[in-house]
Image: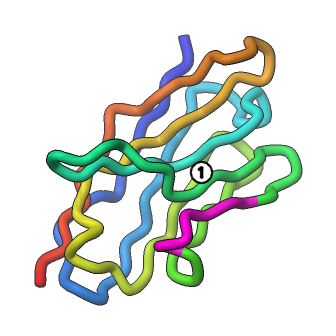
Amino acid sequence: QVQLVESGGGLVQNGDSLTLSCAASGSIVSFITMGWYRQAPGKQRESVATIFTRSSITNYADSVKGRFTISRDNANTVYLQMNSLKPEETAVYYCNARSMSIIGREYWGQGTQVTVSS
């Protein structure tokens, strides 16, 4: 059973930085992609950033380009460095992983709260 465990959320002020971590229970190269999503109260979950685990190619939502950076280590952890955070980015941030071996199978972490105060 794959487990994804997020950490690093918290309360920050407008313009501050925060780094989220997602530790997978196995090697991240067993996934095609890993990524970060967020869901604000009353809104749909949206993709923030994605990384292809073997090539390290990244994709970002337009709203975070230039401010957020997704990266991976050589083992089992993916990071999301968030700079210049805005109050409207207050949300629960979720880690996601898509299986390399089972088409359509994806996994989610439990989420970590990020609150940006104004």
| Camera-side residue of 116 and 65 | 65
Q: In this view, does 83 lie to the left or right of 71?
A: left
Q: Does the magenta stretch include residue 63?
A: yes
- Looking at the image, is 66 positioned above or below residue 10? below
Total numbered labels placed on residues in the image: 1
Tell me the residue at 37%/72% (across/down).
18
Measured as percent of width and height from the top left, residue 75 is found at: 71, 43
- Residue occupied by mark 1: 78
Measured as percent of width and height from the top left, residue 60 is found at: 61, 64
| Camera-side residue of 79 and 88 | 88
Tell me the residue at 59%/51% (across/down).
78
- Looking at the image, is 94 positioned above or below residue 100? below
- 10 Å crowding of disc 1: few (<14), some (14-19), many (20+): many
Q: Is residue 52 left or right of residue 25?
A: right
Residue at the outermost left position: 118
Residue at the outermost right position: 55
- Looking at the image, is 34 positioned above or below residue 118? above
Tell me the residue at 30%/48% (across/down).
39
Image-quadrant location for residue 32: top right
Measured as percent of width and height from the top left, residue 92 is found at: 27, 49
Q: Does the magenta stretch include residue 46?
A: no
| Residue bounds of the magenta highlight | 58-64
Q: Which amino acid does label 1 sit on?
A: Val
Tell me the residue at 50%/50% (across/down).
47
- Looking at the image, is 52 positioned above or below residue 96? below
Measured as percent of width and height from the top left, residue 76 is found at: 65, 40
